[in-house]
């Protein structure tokens, strides 16, 4: 999601510890975690409602069925090509 490495996270932790102090830092982390959890829940709920309204399951099922039909046609063509026997002219 974000391209944040370990060193960046460590730097953020040290700066926040200096700014907020050791007494308020756990409460701040708890609050941020709570808000992030709520945000994820709201986003997930909105996404689920949108998928339900659009009929995403039907679209996914239709696309899957179309892919299966394409695969069957390709397989049938391959089998026909493999089993096609050209007659030999042995009368010479």
Image (cartoon, helix red, strand yellow):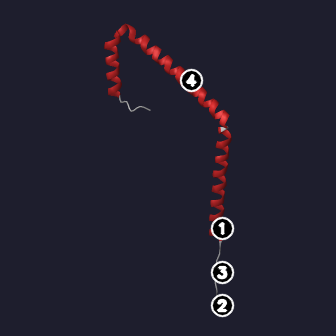
Label 3's element? loop
Whether residue 73 is situated above or below residue 60 in the rendered picture: below
Image location of residue 84, percent across then percent down: 65, 72
State how far apart marks 3 and 1 are (Cα).
15 Å
- Which residue in the structure is indicated by mark 3? 87
Mark 1 burial class by Cα count in 10 Å: few <14, some 14-19, many 20+: few
Residue at the (64%, 47%) spot, across then down = 63
Q: Earlier in the sequence, mark 4 or mark 1?
A: 4
Q: Earlier in the sequence, mark 4 or mark 2?
A: 4
- Which residue in the structure is indicated by mark 4? 41
State how far apart marks 4 and 2 are (Cα).
79 Å
State how far apart marks 4 and 1 are (Cα).
53 Å
Rendered-image quadrant of the N terminus:
top left
State how far apart marks 3 and 4 are (Cα).
68 Å
- Which residue in the structure is indicated by mark 1? 80
Looking at the picture, tell me which residue is in the foreground, 87 or 25: 25
Mark 4 burial class by Cα count in 10 Å: few <14, some 14-19, many 20+: few
Mark 3 burial class by Cα count in 10 Å: few <14, some 14-19, many 20+: few
Q: Quadrant of residue 48?
A: top right
- Which residue in the structure is indicated by mark 2? 91
**In the drawing, does residue 54 fall left or right of residue 42?**
right
Q: Quadrant of residue 74?
A: bottom right
Mark 2 burial class by Cα count in 10 Å: few <14, some 14-19, many 20+: few
Image location of residue 47, percent across then percent down: 59, 31
């Amino acid at each position: 999601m974000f391209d944040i490495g370990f060193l960046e996270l460590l730097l953020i932790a040290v700066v926040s510890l200096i700014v907020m102090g050791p007494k308020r830092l756990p409460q701040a982390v708890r609050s941020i975690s709570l808000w992030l959890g709520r945000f994820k829940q709201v986003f997930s709920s909105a996404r689920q409602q949108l998928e339900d309204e659009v009929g995403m399951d039907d679209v996914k099922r239709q696309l899957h069925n179309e892919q299966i039909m394409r695969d069957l046609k390709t397989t049938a063509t391959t089998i026909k090509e493999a089993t096609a026997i050209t007659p030999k002219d042995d009368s010479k």
